[in-house]
Amino acid sequence: MRIGEIAALVGVTSRAVRHYHHVGLLPEPARQANGYRAYTVRDAVLLARIRRLTEIGLSLDEVRDVLADDAGRELGEVLAELDADLARQEREIQERRQVLAVLLEAPLASDGPLSPALAALLDHAPATTSPAAAKDREHLALLDAAGDGAGAELFAALRPLAEHPGVLALYERLDELEGAGVDDPRIAPLAAELVAAVPDEVLAVIPEGEPSATGFGRVLLDDYPPAQRAVVRRVMEELAERVRRRGTA
Amino acid sequence: MRIGEIAALVGVTSRAVRHYHHVGLLPEPARQANGYRAYTVRDAVLLARIRRLTEIGLSLDEVRDVLADDAGRELGEVLAELDADLARQEREIQERRQVLAVLLEAPLASDGPLSPALAALLDHAPATTSPAAAKDREHLALLDAAGDGAGAELFAALRPLAEHPGVLALYERLDELEGAGVDDPRIAPLAAELVAAVPDEVLAVIPEGEPSATGFGRVLLDDYPPAQRAVVRRVMEELAERVRRRGTA
DNA sequence: AGAAACGTTGACGCTGCGACAAGGTCAAGC
DNA sequence: GCTTGACCTTGTCGCAGCGTCAACGTTTCT
């Protein structure tokens, strides 16, 4: 038999057969005078075993192991392990499909999929074109994806703020500070009102520590022009102070 | 932010971030004087979107597509497609686990896993150390894995032959011909008796056509020494003749 | 005799990074 | 000032299991 024949007989490609030779799964057969590989039935039987094993889902390394010690013992071991692996994969797929089902259900925000907690929050926030509000949403989305699952409670706690009737006005006042200087007189009162608007529940989920020390706090500040940054910094500092008082109370 | 910071913030590795630059998913940010990449919050937001999308299971190409037209339309499309793909994978895994369950149930023959049909046949065949019988089993295993599912009916049809009380004696007579010449007088009668022992059901599942013309027939013959080969060839020819008569009857 | 259909070796491609190598940069401690 | 350690830089190989050229020789059909 030549390579194409044995491949067709067993039901694999010639390329696969050569690959098996290359990785040492199937011994190279003798050659004919013209250099073609000359296969015997024994090769075909071996190749067929390889095919059955790979079809079941064994890796080539595992196939090699199983063929090596031809006691049937190892095979059962490998198969059990494989089944456990498949079971794990099946669970993973099911979990991912669960996530997908939730995402397909939701109205799909334009800036990508969000966690259900954040989606619920944004769903209750008023529609607006305020740049500051947009920036805020980006920051929340960033926190959402930041990995640590700490966002969910925060988003729930922010719900009253989103529904606060005066929140839009506050955003607009922040917008007005875009080109202002750091000594603008509107900074202090706006910061104070923002702090006052933050629900008490939020304080409970803010971890203690200097906010600007964590990468996240510094990074958020860098995203604002000077006057707005001054406002946000004041708010962060004030909230941190209240968190500290919470800790000592 | 430097690369390690943005990576930690979003929850990926620095290597992954560089990879996203390399494949054009994330634009290269400006550099600091020392050559370090200087990331902004906007980069972090984008990176976070990428992370969410890849976590869901999108390939980097799909992520690129979704980010490209930032209408939410494409996203839903891709997600639906992804879900369909996952559903397909889930079915495949379940099917493979079914197969595995059957295999783990069975006693696991030493020469690898067999189809249930062949396993049943061998289970009913008598135990023997005859080389000819062993060869026969190898050939059946080869046919089993040959891809075309035509083996199952044949194995079922061979069941009476396996249980035939005289089958062992026939195998032993074939063994005795191992070193004999092609003109040995025992060839003709053995071939005749073998043909007579083949159940009629087998004829029904043999495809019409010259057996030595198909790769399989030629290959089987090559596996025998001369005298045995003569026997097997006679049997094959005789069976083919009976198949032809079946076709015209 | 030419074309089609085989065979040969060799090398790159695919996915999503991980893991080196061989450096340069920066902050802290001695 | 010097070392140490933790960062950063670019570039390359590796992974699984072959598919897919490339560039060429062989066999076979017409």
Image (cartoon, coloured by chain):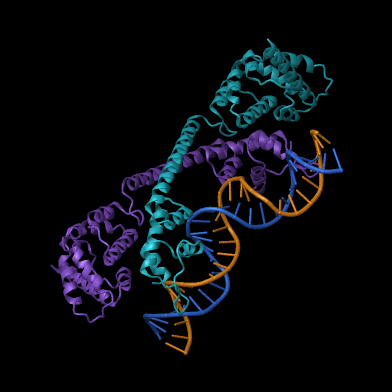
Chain colours: A purple, B cyan, C blue, D orange
Taking the spot 34% from the left edge, 59% from the top edge, the residue there is A145
Q: Quadrant of the C terminus of chain A?
A: bottom left
Q: Quadrant of the N terminus of chain A?
A: top right
Q: Position of residue B43 (x, y in %)?
A: 39, 66
Q: Position of residue A78 (x, y in %)?
A: 51, 41
Q: Is residue A47 above or below residue B220?
A: below
Q: Is residue A232 above or below residue A98?
A: below
- The front one of B80 and B222 is B80
Using the rendered image of the protein, determine whether residue A27 is visible from the camera's viewpoint: yes
Taking the spot 71% from the left edge, 44% from the top edge, the residue there is A28
Question: Could you tell whether A61 is left or right of B17 in the image?
Answer: right
Q: Is residue B219 above or below residue C25?
A: above
- The front one of A69 and B223 is B223
Q: Position of residue A92 (x, y in %)?
A: 40, 45
Taking the spot 19% from the left edge, 62% from the top edge, the residue there is A202
Using the rendered image of the protein, determine whether residue B11 is visible from the camera's viewpoint: no
- The front one of A247 and B227 is A247
Q: Is residue B162 above or below residue A44?
A: above
Q: Position of residue D24 (x, y in %)?
A: 79, 51
Would you identify the image quadrant in which residue B184 lies?
A: top right
Question: Could you tell whether A101 is left or right of B21 in the image?
Answer: left
Would you identify the image quadrant in which residue B41 lies?
A: bottom left
Taking the spot 50% from the left edge, 39% from the top edge, the residue there is A79
Number of marks? 0
